[in-house]
Image (tube, rainbow, N blue to C red):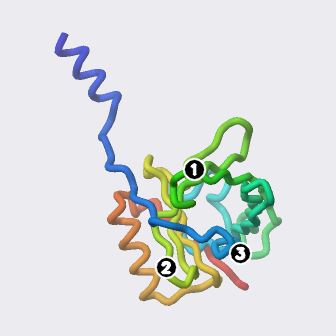
Amino acid sequence: MSLLASLISACAGKQLTPIATVPQVDLPKFMGDWYVIAAIPTAIETESYNAIESYKLDDDGTIATTFTFNKGSLTGPQKKYEPRGFVVKNSGNATWGMQFIWPIKAEYLIAHLDKDYTQTVIARNARDYVWIMARTPKISEEDYKKLTTLVNNLGYDMTKLRRVPHNR
């Protein structure tokens, strides 16, 4: 019986502490363009350059999202994805389900947002993907270090973090 318990325990993996989100997000203020500064990328964005995530709050309360980037280089072919964001009730607007393919909604946690709504960190409890984003295509090295330290403190494998080049 102890062998079975060991196997179940091994399959369960390490339990991670849930990531805390910011207490409240002013959705209209959060809308607009966000440049992806760095990410532990999903499969579609491993070769992204000039990556921008744009949000528009629709009348039904969902978020029309447009993710654009150049694939493979700063001048590579432009790719465009249009997932839809669904704000989770009673989350202070800081937890979303991001739907690329119906009916699956990927977890999207606003783990950091500066008071001016100019820099944010989007995380996931699985610690598989993370995005550092800003309203401008470049941020200071000091700010980059602060944000990467925050990501590290959330429990991410920093060897997977990729800085996203921009020429805008």
Q: Secondary structure at mark 2?
A: loop
Cβ atoms under marks 3 and 1 closer than 8 Å? no
Residue positioned 33% across, 46% down in the render: 16
From the image, tell me which residue sits under label 2. Answer: 114
From the image, tell me which residue sits under label 1. Answer: 89
Q: Is residue 113 left or right of residue 30?
A: left
Q: Residues within 10 Å of mark 2 (few under 14, many from 20)?
A: few
From the image, tell me which residue sits under label 3. Answer: 33
C-alpha gap between disc 3 and disc 2: 15 Å
Q: Position of residue 51 (x, y in %)?
A: 69, 70
What amino acid is at disc 1?
A: Lys
Q: Position of residue 31 (x, y in %)?
A: 69, 71
Residue positioned 52% across, 52% down in the render: 90
What amino acid is at disc 3?
A: Asp
C-alpha gap between disc 3 and disc 1: 24 Å
Of tags 3 and 1, the one toward the viewer is 1
Q: Is residue 11 above or below residue 151?
A: above
Q: Residues within 10 Å of mark 1 (few under 14, many from 20)?
A: few
Residue positioned 73% across, 54% down in the render: 62
Q: Secondary structure at mark 1?
A: loop
Q: Position of residue 113 (x, y in %)?
A: 50, 73
